[in-house]
Amino acid sequence: MDRRMFLQTFGAGVASLSLPAFASPAPSCKIIGIGAAGCNLATALRASNILDRAGAALSYVCIDLGPHALEFVDIANDACPALAPIKTLMLAPVRAGGRVNAARAACLHHRAILAELLAGSDMVVLLAGLGGGSGSGVTPILSRLARDAGVVTVAAVVTPFAFEGVRNRRADAVMNRLQREADLAMAFSNEEWFNRFNGDTPMFDVFDALDRHIANQLHAVMSRLNTPRSRAGFTFAPDCQSV
Ligand SMILES: Nc1nc2c(ncn2[C@@H]2O[C@H](COP(=O)(O)OP(=O)(O)OP(=O)(O)O)[C@@H](O)[C@H]2O)c(=O)[nH]1
Ligand SMILES: [Mg+2]
């Protein structure tokens, strides 16, 4: 496995960040799940409580172009009423169904609502699966809007399985964009992750373990961002041994 693939698989990212000093000792961080995979991830992160220890004031939002993924978020909200509810935002009542351009258009159409959503946050974490329509179309635009608003932007995305074919090329192109548009872009390859398990492990458990891995990597990033020493800029190299 080459170095790039290694980093992409196990929590990509070696990045030097120059960050503003946060005004508050507990910076506000909005976790935004986009598309089906992003909504699943946001729901899993909230349920895991792993990020609660990162020293930020967290709030959660899920965005999709149709109601399907958002209905699951509502079910998760109802299942854990003790946790802060995840807000939902439907950008357009259409199913992007792999159409990145439809997702981009919906995103641009709702630009003002998205800018309002980002306002007041010190940091955003964008979660999505790349290769489909919604996550691939919305995430880079949201990332750009957040950076333009001076919000520290971390993107944590999953990339497709090899058998998903053309989705991989699309995911690569979006990842390249995200590396420019986000302060830190972390990619987690579904393909590489699943290859680490033998065929006896139930698929659900493998996805679950990836959710936890991403939560732990984000916890490491957010904890570093919240320490005063690191705000002037730091190099993030994830601890790959802790997977
Ligand atoms: N790890 C993980 N990967 C997922 C999950 N759901 C989908 N994926 C991956 O994410 C990619 C994008 O899929 P979706 O999130 O369903 O796509 P979308 O952004 O909703 O896009 P459209 O439905 O086409 O608008 C897929 O090709 C899968 O590889 C999930 O729950 N966990
Ligand atoms: Mg979808």
Image (tube, rainbow, N blue to C red):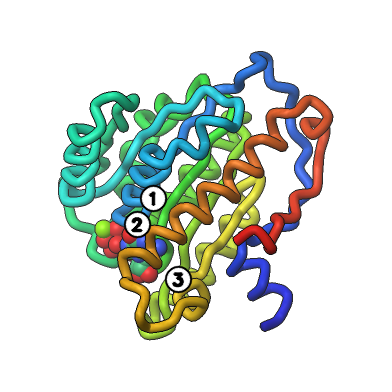
Report the amino acid beneath label 1: Leu
**Amino acid residing under circle 2:** Ala
The quarter in which the C terminus is drawn is bottom right
Residue at the image position 47 percent from the left and 43 percent from the top = 142
Against 222, is 205 above or below? below
Q: Are marks 1 and 2 in contact (CB under 8 Å)?
A: yes
Position of residue 15 in the picture relative to residue 86 (left or right) = right
Q: Ligand 1: does it lie within 8 Å of the C-beta at label 3?
A: yes
Q: Residue 37 got which mark?
A: 2
Please state if 86 lies on the left or on the right of 67 as rendered. right
**Above or below, 152 relative to 126:** above
Label 1 beta carbon less than 8 Å to ligand 1: yes
Circle 1: element type: helix
Q: CA distance from mark 3 to mark 1?
A: 13 Å
Neighbourhood count class around disc 1 (C-alpha, 10 Å): few under 14, some 14–19, many 20 upward = many
Residue positioned 29% across, 28% down in the render: 85
Foreground pick, 182 / 28:
28
Locate ligand 2 by image quadrant: bottom left
Residue 220 picture location, percent across and down: 65, 44
Inspect the image, locate mark 3, and give the three-letter code of the amino acid beneath it: Asn
Residue beneath label 1, please? 41
Residue at x-position 32% and y-position 53%? 35
Q: Which residue position is annotated with label 3?
A: 190
Note whether ligand 1 is within 8 Å of mark 2.
Answer: yes
Q: Residues within 10 Å of mark 3 (few under 14, many from 20)?
A: some
In this rendering, would 72 be left or right of 122? Answer: left
Instruction: Say whether disc 3 or disc 2 marks the residue closer to the N-terminus.
Output: 2
| Front residue of 57 and 32 | 57
In the rendered image, residue 211, in percent from the top left (x then y), is placed at 44, 55
Residue 131 occupies quadrant: bottom left
